[in-house]
Image (cartoon, rainbow, N blue to C red):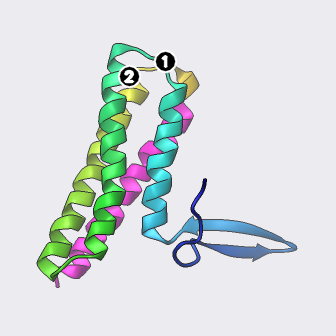
Amino acid sequence: MKISNFKHQISNNIQIGSSKIPNKIYDLEERTFQFAKNFSSYYKKIPRTVSNIEYGKQAIRSSGSSGSNYIEANEALSKKDFLMRIKICRKEAKESAYWLRLIIESNDEKHREEGLRLFNEAIELKKIFSTIIQKSAK
């Protein structure tokens, strides 16, 4: 069972001519959820080698941890608590990118494109968390 729209609108639509084009997801809880879910789907497609199994386990943990820590940050008891949890989110996003890079570089071209999309999303999430840290520390 899918849980959808439990929060606010999760994406904006851009009107071009008579068609709507979905834009990036702005709800960070949803975006981190989709990142973890998309990695899980990707992991099911790659070959079951010893390295893929180990790298994949680590990436599943770190990709899910980014989102769960973001939810925790939104429930923080203080600014210090919030910043600590966002720093954990950033660390987990960086770790996800690391494991994804290992998976991408140790597999065939067949799985490269989807892996690179996920890698780029991990980098974008890291940058978003870094910006939140910078703006919240002021």
Mark 1: give few (<14), some (14-19) or many (20+) Cα within 10 Å. Answer: few
Q: Which residues are magenta?
A: 112-138
Please tell me which residue lies in front, 15 or 89: 89
Residue 133 at what x, y percent from top left? 22, 72
- Write the residue at 55% across / 27% down: 45
- Write the residue at 20% across / 74% down: 82
Mark identifier at residue 68: none
Q: Residue 50: tell me if it is visible.
A: yes
Residue 124 among magenta residues: yes
- Write the residue at 54% across / 79% down: 8
Tag 1, which secondary structure?
loop
Residue 109 at what x, y percent from top left? 54, 23
State the quadrant of the C terminus. Answer: bottom left
Q: Which residue is mark 1?
A: 47
Residue lying at the far top in this picture: please name it.
49
Q: Is residue 30 left or right of residue 67?
A: right
- Write the residue at 46% across / 56% down: 33
Please tell me which residue lies in front, 135 or 81: 81
Say if mark 2 contacts mark 1, CB within 8 Å.
yes
Residue 61 at what x, y percent from top left? 31, 42
Mark identifier at residue 52: 2
Residue 36 at what x, y percent from top left? 44, 48
Please determine whether, in this image, residue 64 is positioned above or below residue 85: above
